[in-house]
């Protein structure tokens, strides 16, 4: 039992360090891509026809993002957490594979933990993706 606690703590710290390093490297590499925006060039005022103005007046104004979208746009911490859970899931899958090679059987609770980590990684990844889409919608 002590072996699993020590090795689990070591695997957790290594996974956290790798996840943090990958996250910071990704932000450094791709961080400048989202900030570059071309300013729209303002052309000279062109005379409009009366028909275009009437059509533009009938069109409803675009609505702003919903409150839920604005709340989801602030979820910046889900990507590192999803990456950490994904690395933990990979480590526990690797440990389960190594334990399956031994003559003893795997404990059922351990396999449940591996499955829960996998579903947690999927859920956090989906939440992070929705957060990115919401942030994109709020910037428009």
Image (cartoon, rainbow, N blue to C red):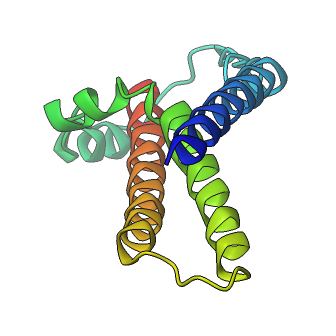
Splitting the image into 4 quarters, where does residue 119 fall?
Answer: bottom left
- Is residue 58 found left or right of 52 in the rendered image? left
Q: Quadrant of residue 109?
A: bottom left
Find residue 10 and report its horizontal and vertical position in percent: 66, 33
At 37% from the left and 28% from the top, the residue drawn is 75
Q: Residue at x 66, y 39 (%)?
A: 11
At x 33%, y 46%, the residue is: 51
Measured along the vertical axis of the image, is residue 57 above or below residue 129? above
Q: Which residue is at the front of the view, 36 or 41? A: 36
Nearer the observer, 82 or 73: 82
Q: Identify which residue, 13 or 81, lies in the foreground.
A: 13
Quarter of the view holding residue 63: top left
Q: Is residue 95 left or right of residue 4?
A: right
In the rendered image, residue 77, in percent from the top left (x then y), is placed at: 45, 26
The vertical placement of 59 against 108, above or below, is above
Q: Residue 36: x and y, percent?
A: 73, 17
In the rendered view, tell whether residue 88 sits above or below residue 30: below
Residue 125 x, y percent position in the rendering: 48, 52
Left or right, residue 92 beside residue 1: right
Q: How many marks?
A: 0
Q: Nearer the viewer, residue 62 or 34?
A: 34
Q: Residue at x 60, y 35 (%)?
A: 6
């Amino acid at each position: 039992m002590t072996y699993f606690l020590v090795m689990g703590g070591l695997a957790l710290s290594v996974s956290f360090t790798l996840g943090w390093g990958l996250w910071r490297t990704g932000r450094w590499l791709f961080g400048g891509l989202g900030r570059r925006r071309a300013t729209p060039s303002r052309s000279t005022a062109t005379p409009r026809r009366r028909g275009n103005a009437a059509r533009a007046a009938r069109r409803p104004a675009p609505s702003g993002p919903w409150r839920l979208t604005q709340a989801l746009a602030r979820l910046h911490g889900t990507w590192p957490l999803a990456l950490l859970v994904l690395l933990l899931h990979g480590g526990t899958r690797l440990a389960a594979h190594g334990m399956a090679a031994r003559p003893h059987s795997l404990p059922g609770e351990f396999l449940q933990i591996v499955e829960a980590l996998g579903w947690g990684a999927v859920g956090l990844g989906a939440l992070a993706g929705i957060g990115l889409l919401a942030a994109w919608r709020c910037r428009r």
